[in-house]
Image (cartoon, helix red, strand yellow):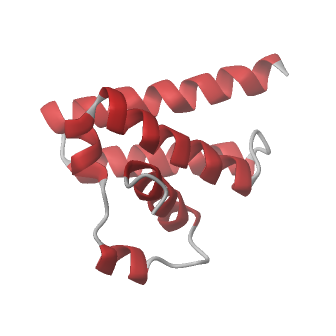
Amino acid sequence: MKKLLLILLGLILGTLLGGYLGTVYFAKGEVILSMCTMGDIATKNSYLTKQQLLSLAEKTGQELTIKYPLVAKHLLLDEASIGKASEQSDCSQLLVSLSKGINGGK
């Protein structure tokens, strides 16, 4: 249980910090790659189910919108990208869920 909480905390903080640093120092792609890698590790090692990961991504998007609106703006996917997102790709679905949270559930 403690391990799971540490992973969740690391995922949330990593996403927030990575998102912030991404707007300041790094390219958007590097932030997305980091988020997808953390998500992949969390699901492959059974720290989180895919549904838990997607729920966490959506809640992270909501939090980014409140605390870091500029970061949220940079990570928001447009409708065309959301429409092209692969159902089989955990990374794509993670980014769609993050955008959903940023967009207020839309």
3 in relation to 89, above or below: above
Q: Position of residue 15 (x, y in %)?
A: 43, 35
Closest to the observer: 19 or 76? 76
Q: In this orientation, does residue 25 appear? A: no
* Residue 49 locus on image (x, y percent): 77, 51
Considering every residue shown, the one lying at the far top of the view is 2
Asked if 83 appears above or below 35 in the picture, the reply is below
Quadrant of the image containing the N terminus: top right
Most foreground residue, 56 or 17: 56
Report the side of 48 relative to 100 (left or right). Answer: right
* Most distant residue in the left direction: 24
Q: How many marks?
A: 0
**Side (left or right) of 75 relative to 23:** right
- Identify the residue at image location x=29%, y=47%: 30
Residue located at (32% from left, 75% from top) = 79
Using the image, determine if residue 76 lies above or below residue 86. Answer: above
Residue that appears at 43% across and 33% down? 63
Residue 10 as seen in the image, left or right of residue 64: right
User: What residue is at 18 percent from the left and 37 percent from the top?
Assistant: 23
Q: Is residue 90 visible?
A: yes
Q: Where 56 sits versus 67, above or below?
A: below
Q: Position of residue 104 (x, y in %)?
A: 43, 52
* Placement of the C terminus among the 4 image quadrants: bottom left
